[in-house]
Amino acid sequence: MNRTIKALGLCVALAAGLGMSLPSYAATTLRIGTVLAPDDPMGQGLEKFKKEVEAATNGDVVVEVFHNSQLGDTTEMIDQARAGANVGTVTDVARLSSFVPSLAIMSAPFLFDTYEQADKFALSDEYLAWGDQLKEKSGLVMLASNWYQGPRHALTQKPISTPADLKGVRMRTIGAPIWIETINAMGATATPIAWGEVYSALQLGTIDAAEAQPTAIKGAKLYEVIKNVTKTGHIQLVTALVVSASAWDQISAENQKIVRDLAVENGRYASGLTIDLGEKALADVAASGVTISDVDLAPFKQAVSGVYGKLNLEGEAAIVNKVLGR
């Protein structure tokens, strides 16, 4: 009898020991926010990502999607994630360059000609190595960096055809050095404010102009408060899906791979929507009475050519060209 009790006790102790030595993963919730509208391609991509992640992980990873700045502006969501909250967002990569300076190259002016080029570079060993550094230096994990939001165009009250036409124009842009230097080099005065404030700032005259991609112009109804869209395409807005490292480390290695793969796959899905819906969005904006104009890009490309050297990104540009074989 005593031997039986001792044997049972030993089994319990062994089981407890084994339980303590193996990692245990409870269901993890990732709260993904975006400043864009639900019908924006990024919003549609995130909703698809949510469904597929939850199905593929059998509910071990739950994704909640919040649109229209419900979790705050992009910078605020990044700050929440870095503080350890189970929060993530789709962000322009330039915002992350304060942690890993090389990442700013993804938002460099007139760098990528097509989405395919950006997608290829975003999955290159060189770029992914910078992504690995991001976790160490910021507490953020980059799941995928191929969520394309489209070409950024100039939104103004007066027609423009050269950089000289932008002199003295206060243009809203993203508050990262590569964006600020690009807009200033184009001739305008870069004015960083939160995306959710752009409509009212244009309406009240706090700013004179903005720059945005076609789907966002339509989604934010900026056509109601501007008169001209000039197709400068000065930056191809390639964005990244990032989450808190604290939340990420709660997920098993098997499920991490599933989530990463689906982030890349749905980045391509959302990007496809961006490309398909971009021209339609511009057509709808034109139908509202806004003038849509093409422009000779040569003067603008010349004007921003010094931005690479000013921000020490010439080496990164060479890496991009090598990866793309050009």
Image (cartoon, rainbow, N blue to C red):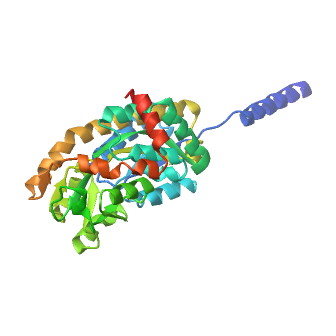
Image coordinates for residue 76, horizontal then vertical, percent: 46, 60
Q: Does the rendering let one see residue 90?
A: no
In the image, what residue occupies the spot 41% across and 33% down?
321
- Residue at 32 percent of width and 32 percent of height: 116
The correct choice, above or below, for 210 with respect to 114 in the image is below
Q: Is residue 151 above or below residue 291?
A: above
* In this picture, residue 134 sits left or right of residue 326: right
Spot occupied by residue 158 in the image (x, y as percentages of width and height): 16, 64
Most distant residue in the right direction:
2
Question: Depth check: 297 or 286 in front?
Answer: 297
Residue 265 point in image, percent of width and height: 38, 32
Picture coordinates of residue 147, whole percent (x, y)? 36, 41
- Quadrant location of the C terminus? top left
Which of the 4 image quadrants contains residue 170?
Answer: bottom left
Residue at x-position 78% and y-position 33%: 17
Question: Left or right: where does residue 129 sit relative to residue 223?
Answer: right
Q: Quadrant of the N terminus?
A: top right
Q: Give 232 or 264, whichever is nearer the viewer.
A: 232
The number of numbered discs placed on residues in the rendered structure image is 0
Closer to the camera, 310 or 284?
A: 310
The reply to whether residue 291 is in sight is: yes
Residue drawn at (25%, 50%), measured in percent from left and top? Answer: 299
Horizontally, residue 135 falls left or right of residue 312, namely: right
